[in-house]
Image (tube, rainbow, N blue to C red):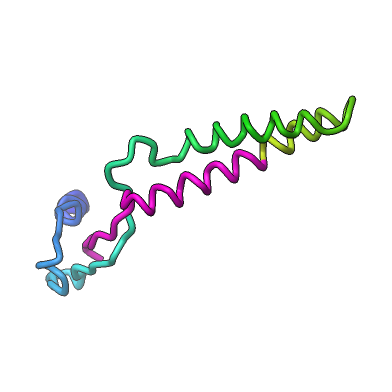
Amino acid sequence: MMMAANAAMAQSYGPQDEGRRFNDGTRVVCHNVEVQKNSKDPNRIAGTAAGAVVGGLLGNQIGGGTGKKLATVGGAVAGGAVGRTVQGHHQEQQGDRVVEKRCTRQ
Protein backbone atom coordinates (compact mmCIF):
# COMPACT_ATOMS: atom_id res chain seq x y z
CA MET A 1 0.00 0.00 0.00
CA MET A 2 2.80 2.42 0.91
CA MET A 3 4.63 1.72 -2.37
CA ALA A 4 1.53 2.60 -4.35
CA ALA A 5 1.24 5.95 -2.56
CA ASN A 6 4.94 6.74 -3.18
CA ALA A 7 4.62 5.78 -6.84
CA ALA A 8 1.62 8.09 -7.23
CA MET A 9 3.51 10.96 -5.60
CA ALA A 10 6.50 10.42 -7.92
CA GLN A 11 4.34 11.44 -10.90
CA SER A 12 5.26 14.67 -12.67
CA TYR A 13 2.91 17.67 -12.42
CA GLY A 14 2.84 20.92 -14.37
CA PRO A 15 1.38 24.39 -13.83
CA GLN A 16 -1.90 23.21 -15.38
CA ASP A 17 -2.30 20.84 -12.38
CA GLU A 18 -1.88 23.57 -9.74
CA GLY A 19 -4.57 23.28 -7.05
CA ARG A 20 -5.60 19.76 -8.10
CA ARG A 21 -6.75 17.78 -5.05
CA PHE A 22 -6.51 14.05 -4.44
CA ASN A 23 -8.57 11.62 -2.32
CA ASP A 24 -5.76 11.25 0.22
CA GLY A 25 -5.92 14.99 1.07
CA THR A 26 -2.84 16.01 -0.91
CA ARG A 27 -2.84 18.63 -3.64
CA VAL A 28 -0.54 19.97 -6.33
CA VAL A 29 1.40 23.08 -5.26
CA CYS A 30 3.56 25.15 -7.64
CA HIS A 31 6.49 27.44 -6.80
CA ASN A 32 8.75 29.66 -8.88
CA VAL A 33 12.32 28.35 -8.71
CA GLU A 34 15.51 29.92 -10.11
CA VAL A 35 17.41 27.32 -12.13
CA GLN A 36 20.66 27.24 -14.05
CA LYS A 37 20.36 27.00 -17.84
CA ASN A 38 22.89 26.61 -20.63
CA SER A 39 25.93 26.92 -18.40
CA LYS A 40 29.03 24.82 -18.84
CA ASP A 41 30.09 25.66 -15.27
CA PRO A 42 27.00 25.89 -13.01
CA ASN A 43 29.13 25.54 -9.83
CA ARG A 44 31.39 28.42 -10.90
CA ILE A 45 34.53 26.33 -10.53
CA ALA A 46 36.47 28.21 -13.23
CA GLY A 47 35.89 31.59 -11.55
CA THR A 48 36.79 30.20 -8.14
CA ALA A 49 40.00 28.58 -9.42
CA ALA A 50 41.12 31.61 -11.43
CA GLY A 51 40.44 33.93 -8.50
CA ALA A 52 42.33 31.65 -6.12
CA VAL A 53 45.40 31.59 -8.39
CA VAL A 54 45.44 35.37 -8.82
CA GLY A 55 44.80 35.96 -5.11
CA GLY A 56 47.53 33.49 -4.14
CA LEU A 57 50.03 35.18 -6.46
CA LEU A 58 49.19 38.61 -5.07
CA GLY A 59 49.32 37.34 -1.48
CA ASN A 60 52.72 35.79 -2.15
CA GLN A 61 54.11 39.27 -2.87
CA ILE A 62 53.44 40.36 0.72
CA GLY A 63 55.69 39.78 3.75
CA GLY A 64 58.29 37.14 4.32
CA GLY A 65 58.66 33.76 6.09
CA THR A 66 55.52 32.57 7.86
CA GLY A 67 53.73 35.83 7.09
CA LYS A 68 54.30 35.26 3.39
CA LYS A 69 52.73 31.80 3.61
CA LEU A 70 49.72 33.16 5.50
CA ALA A 71 49.31 35.99 3.00
CA THR A 72 49.47 33.50 0.11
CA VAL A 73 46.78 31.28 1.65
CA GLY A 74 44.62 34.27 2.61
CA GLY A 75 44.99 35.72 -0.87
CA ALA A 76 43.99 32.42 -2.45
CA VAL A 77 40.89 32.12 -0.27
CA ALA A 78 39.82 35.72 -0.83
CA GLY A 79 40.57 35.52 -4.55
CA GLY A 80 38.54 32.32 -4.87
CA ALA A 81 35.53 33.97 -3.22
CA VAL A 82 35.80 37.04 -5.45
CA GLY A 83 36.23 34.91 -8.59
CA ARG A 84 33.15 32.86 -7.76
CA THR A 85 31.07 36.00 -7.19
CA VAL A 86 32.28 37.65 -10.40
CA GLN A 87 31.47 34.54 -12.45
CA GLY A 88 28.02 34.34 -10.83
CA HIS A 89 27.24 37.95 -11.77
CA HIS A 90 28.45 37.30 -15.31
CA GLN A 91 26.23 34.22 -15.62
CA GLU A 92 23.21 36.17 -14.38
CA GLN A 93 23.84 38.95 -16.90
CA GLN A 94 24.18 36.40 -19.70
CA GLY A 95 20.79 34.91 -18.81
CA ASP A 96 22.18 31.62 -17.53
CA ARG A 97 19.68 31.63 -14.67
CA VAL A 98 15.95 31.57 -15.35
CA VAL A 99 12.82 31.23 -13.23
CA GLU A 100 10.68 28.15 -13.83
CA LYS A 101 7.46 27.02 -12.21
CA ARG A 102 7.93 23.64 -10.50
CA CYS A 103 4.93 21.70 -9.21
CA THR A 104 4.84 18.95 -6.59
CA ARG A 105 2.17 16.96 -4.80
CA GLN A 106 2.02 17.83 -1.12
Quadrant containing the C terminus is bottom left
Q: Quadrant of residue 41?
A: top left
Q: Is residue 6 left or right of residue 53?
A: left
Nearer-the-camera pick, 45 or 6: 45
Q: Where does the image place residue 26, in percent across and percent down from the top left?
A: 21, 69
* Placement of 7 over or under 16, stated as above or below: above
Can residue 96 be seen by looking at this rendering? yes
Q: Where does the image place residue 88, in percent across and percent down from the top left?
A: 45, 48
Can residue 104 be seen by looking at this rendering? no
- The residue furthest right is 65
* Placement of 70 over or under 15, stated as above or below: above
The residue stretch that appears in magenta: 78-106
Q: Where does the image place residue 78, in percent across and percent down from the top left?
A: 67, 42
Q: Quadrant of residue 40?
A: top left
Q: Residue at x 73, y 33 (%)?
A: 73
- The residue furthest top is 65
Q: Residue at x 53, y 48 (%)?
A: 85
Total number of numbered discs in the rendering? 0
Q: Residue at x 28, y 60 (%)?
A: 99
Nearer-the-camera pick, 9 or 86: 86
Nearer-the-camera pick, 25 or 54: 54
Q: Where does the image place residue 48, in percent across and percent down from the top left?
A: 54, 37
- As for residue 26 lying within the magenta part, the answer is no
Q: Residue at x 82, y 33 (%)?
A: 62
- The residue furthest left is 16
Q: Is residue 49 left or right of residue 75?
A: left
- As for residue 103 lying within the magenta part, the answer is yes
